[in-house]
Structures are given as structure tokens and as C-alpha cells.
Amino acid sequence: MNTNLGNKKYFTVTSHNYGAAYFELQPILRLIDGEIFGYEILFRGEKKIPWLEVDRLVVSYLSLNQMHSTSLFVNLSHEGLLDIPDEQFIDLTRKNRIYFELTESESEEAIHAASAIKVNRLADQGVLFAIDDYGSGRDGNLRVEELSKVEIVKIDKDLLISMMLDECIRSSTDIFLKKCVSLGIQTLAEGVETKDLLQFARSRNFNFAQGFYIDEITSVLPHALHSFKTEAIKLNAKDVWTETWELR
């Protein structure tokens, strides 16, 4: 069933320790042809759940559900990356086309080093990775250099806005974007909340875009989630899509 209830799609995953956790599927637009490329899985629960547990819930969900016709973007904490076994990452990659997003947040150097080693090991076996929030935290250029293979770099919303308003920032970031092209890395503009930001992202030759404005304009497009078994429920007084798995 593939009916559109507005521009929001959700699913729930239930665990014994924390109950139901809600996740939104945010569309990612491919700019070259205006089609939906995939969805980022975003935690939208009101409960305070440790990020490591959120990572485990998403990975467990995707282990049970094969999505045939779209790409998925999954945020991973450093703890989740290091905790989840290599075999599970590889198995998920066989079932789904998943880009695991690595955060640019600050953390201990030893954790970053251990993460880089594991990412490089998994990338050699076909697991796909993206760098999230480039420009918001740790030196993103260093992050790109320490990883053997990155598929996509996601430019942080604040950096995108700064690029549009400040010529110096625009010039320096353009150098990085050209470097990505030379390395075969695709780029994604995050936080695209207006038509002007979308037009700017196109003018800088970004490959993809996501954000509130993308949610709005893609609500009229066919959704690619053909493999979801869905039903309508009420969540915060809004009709949404859901699929629930009991994890044991």
C-alpha cells in the first residue's frame, strides 16, 4: 500500500526496555533530475533513549525489513559504530542500499581513530559511508583524508547559509566541493528550508538536498518505499505511516 498521507512517513520499533521508538523517513532529493534518491531515518521519539540504543533499534529493524527500491541514510554514533559487529553491517548492506552517516561532533581522539579503522575495514567490504554535518564540528577535511572511501559528504545547514551570504566562505567551501568531485565523492546540502537555498545548492552543483522545503516539494512525488507494509494510525493528532517490529 503506497498512499501518501501528506509529506511525512514514520515507522515505529518497539523494544522491551524503552517501548515504542518513532522514526521519520525524510526524503532526499537528487538535484540532477528532481527525483527522490532515498530517505534519512531520523529519530523522533519523545522519550530519552541512549543513542547507542537508538542505533541498535534501527539496525535491528533493517535486519528484519528489506527495502528494494530506495537508498537509506542511517545516523550512527561513534559508540554504535564500534559496538555493532562487522558481520551485521555487511549483512545489512546485502539486504539494503544503506549509507551509514558518521557525525562530525567532537569526541575523544582515540574514539575517532578507532572509528576510522573500522570504517576503512568495512568500506573495503562494500559498506557505504557518508560524512554528516560537514562544517559543524571536527575538521571535516581531516575526516575525509583519514577514511579510505567516502561516498557522500553532507554539508551542514549553517555552512550552507554562510556560503550563500559570505563570498569568502563560499570560495573556500567551493574548493572543498571541487576536491570532492575529484575524489568521486558526491555532496548533499542539508537544511534546505527555502526555495532560495535549493536554487543556491543547484548553482554550486550539489548532487542532493534535504530539509523542510524538500519535504514540501516532494510530497507530490511518487514515494519509493514500495516494500513498506503500512497502516494508518494517530500520532500527535496526525495521520502517519507506521510499521512496528517487536525486538527480542
Image: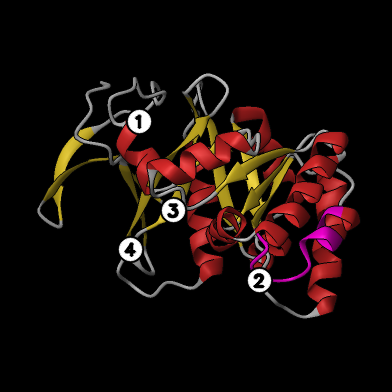
Graded by Cα atoms within 10 Å as few (under 14), some (14 to 19) or many (20 or more), the crowding at tag 3 reads some
Mark sitting earlier along the chain (4/2)? 4
Mark nearest the camera among 4 and 2 is: 2
Residue at numbered disc 4 = 45
Q: Which residue is drawn at 16% across and 37% down?
A: 232
Furthest toward the bottom, the residue is 108
Mark nearest the camera among 3 and 1 is: 1
Name the residue type under label 4. Gly
Name the residue type under label 3. Leu
Q: Is mark 4 on a helix, strand or loop?
A: loop
In what quadrant of the picture does the N terminus appear?
Answer: top left
Mark sitting earlier along the chain (3/1)? 3
Residue at numbered disc 3 = 42
Graded by Cα atoms within 10 Å as few (under 14), some (14 to 19) or many (20 or more), the crowding at tag 2 reads some
139 part of magenta stretch? yes
Name the residue type under label 2. Ser
Q: Compared with residue 80, is residue 220 higher up or lower down, i.e. above or below?
A: above
Residue at numbered disc 2 = 105
Residue 248 seen from this side: no
* Figure coloring: secondary structure
Choose top left, top right, bottom left or bottom right for residue 220. Answer: top left
Cα distance in 3D space between marks 3 and 1 = 17 Å
Q: What element carries label 3?
A: strand
Graded by Cα atoms within 10 Å as few (under 14), some (14 to 19) or many (20 or more), the crowding at tag 4 reads some
Q: Compared with residue 163, is residue 51 higher up or lower down, i.e. above or below?
A: below
Residue at numbered disc 1 = 218
Image location of residue 156, percent across then percent down: 59, 58
Cα distance in 3D space between marks 3 and 4 = 9 Å
Mark nearest the camera among 4 and 1 is: 1
Cα distance in 3D space between marks 4 and 1 = 23 Å
- State which region is magenta: 134-144
Q: What element carries label 2?
A: loop
